[in-house]
Image (cartoon, coloured by chain):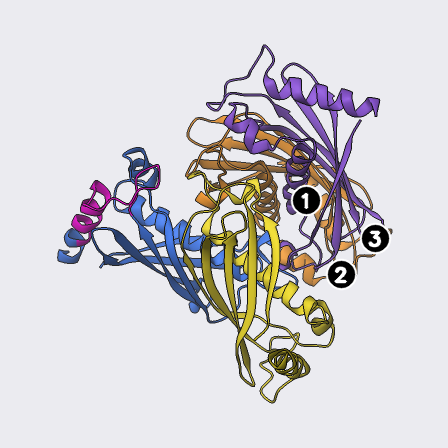
Chain colours: A blue, B purple, C yellow, D orange
Amino acid sequence: MTTISTHTRVRYGETDKMGIAYHGRYLDWFEMGRTEFCRALGKSFSYWESEGVMLPVVEAHCRYKSPLLYDDEIEIQTTVKNLSTVSVIFECKIFNAATHKLAAEGHTKHAFTSPDGKLLRNGNKLLDWLKNSSDENQNE
Amino acid sequence: MTTISTHTRVRYGETDKMGIAYHGRYLDWFEMGRTEFCRALGKSFSYWESEGVMLPVVEAHCRYKSPLLYDDEIEIQTTVKNLSTVSVIFECKIFNAATHKLAAEGHTKHAFTSPDGKLLRNGNKLLDWLKNSSDENQNE
Amino acid sequence: MTTISTHTRVRYGETDKMGIAYHGRYLDWFEMGRTEFCRALGKSFSYWESEGVMLPVVEAHCRYKSPLLYDDEIEIQTTVKNLSTVSVIFECKIFNAATHKLAAEGHTKHAFTSPDGKLLRNGNKLLDWLKNSSDENQNE
Amino acid sequence: MTTISTHTRVRYGETDKMGIAYHGRYLDWFEMGRTEFCRALGKSFSYWESEGVMLPVVEAHCRYKSPLLYDDEIEIQTTVKNLSTVSVIFECKIFNAATHKLAAEGHTKHAFTSPDGKLLRNGNKLLDWLKNSSDENQNE
């Protein structure tokens, strides 16, 4: 399964009074990973939204392995784990890019919905594309 | 001119590695102040959005006077300063509620626009309401 | 086991382009819940930090049940679920306060550490307090 | 005076229900700009903090010129505008990188303080470095 990497740095405003990155911000980084995953496979997530498919999060999970500090460069690795007719799971690992140490890992589960929030029960274009992109990449 | 007060506390995730509230979060508190200002005057800002008037920010300014710490209770004081046909300025002061010390003061300037971002050049219902609410309250 | 409730509203800046509260912000609300849990039991979390006990998050989980909109009042219900010598789990439910509909539920797991991030392996004052506060409240 | 550019993209969680980037997040981007400004000149801001100089924000100002959308690539241009013995002003412009349209411009003013928040009244190493780096670069 394709894994896409993207990099960013811990912002000052993402740290907290413990001096480390605030745990809630990792979900923002997971989202960056999903955005870059779609772009790397050839179509932006914005494109899919304009095609009428939304991906609201129905579950999020994160295990924090080692703290990140202000200005640490991080590598976000994203992959698709489970694809069903109505949902997709993105798995995400965050590494300290300098030390290659795993900082956190987790996933988000998303429903495929219409722009007005209705579950798309009978499949959709984004689902097909994720399936095909994965298949193509698995064969490579 | 009416001044409306609302209270909240500094969240852990709003602090940064300096151990104080991150300066960017004050704009979120200013926004809380505007929301409560409208509610206190009798109509929620959601209502005005549903009536087709949006208030995108065109300018923001903040002076930071004394730092706020995690869990500090803050008082947000909001008032309308300038009303023109096309824009409104909300002024905001943030106090440490325990010490009554001024923590920050500033303002945001907003354009009146339609939901698709077009400037409402010829007045609008929210403008009239803000004008009347202010007038009524000035007479009290 | 004691459950503590606290209320807040969805801020404008906590919504996203889907028009609903962004999933990452729920972890900030969980944190508000933990803060108010400690205060309600008689000692602020700031106090425990000043006593040398930190609670970095080692795991976070959230299931999103129904979307929240801008300005929705939410009720955050927090309870302690698991207490061990080295960690504690806080469980959290978030309700739409107007409809009493469950919006999300989840938990965070925290390690007890010193201010410099060392695991407190042999117990600590905050652990004892949480245990006693829970026991006292269970008897009520 | 040296101007340093850095790029990022608007995250999903940085948009709001108007469908555009939330105005408060621009201050986070200004901060990214300052961080990269220091790195580009040869010493990270983390380094200066470890040398005992902090830069709390005492004033922030931003004018919003044109909205930014989710996933828009932005260019952040940062320069030092005013240097005094006790403070520094960073100016910041944010462009839509695809259209080169100015999205926002503003500044932040910072005090030079010790880690415990005391104003450094008699100059400091970071001030000297900013002065020298600027001078060197002005001669280029």
Question: How would you rate the neighbour count of disc 1 (Cα within 10 Å): few for under 14, some for 14-19, many for 20 or more?
Answer: many
Q: Dot 1 falls on which chain?
A: B
Q: Is residue D64 above or below residue A30?
A: above
List x then y, in percent, for residue A87.
27, 53
Q: Quadrant of residue D97?
A: top left
Question: How would you rate the neighbour count of disc 2 (Cα within 10 Å): few for under 14, some for 14-19, many for 20 or more?
Answer: some
* Residue at mark 1: B26
Queried whether the magenta region covers residue A124, the answer comes back as yes
Disc 1 element: helix
Q: Is residue C13 above or below residue D20?
A: below
Queried whether the magenta region covers residue D90, the answer comes back as no
* Residue at mark 3: D119
Residue interval drawn in magenta: A112-134
Disc 2 element: loop
Residue D43 in sight in this render: no
Q: Dot 2 falls on which chain?
A: D
Disc 3 element: loop
Q: Quadrant of residue C38?
A: bottom right
Q: Dot 3 falls on which chain?
A: D
Amino acid type of disc 3?
Leu
* Residue at mark 2: D115
* Residue closest to the eye, B43 or B109: B43
Residue A53 in sight in this render: yes
Q: Is residue B45 above or below residue C8?
A: above
Residue contact at pointers 3 and 1, CB within 8 angstroms: no
Amino acid type of disc 2?
Pro
In space, the residues marked 3 and 1 are separated at their CA atoms by 22 Å
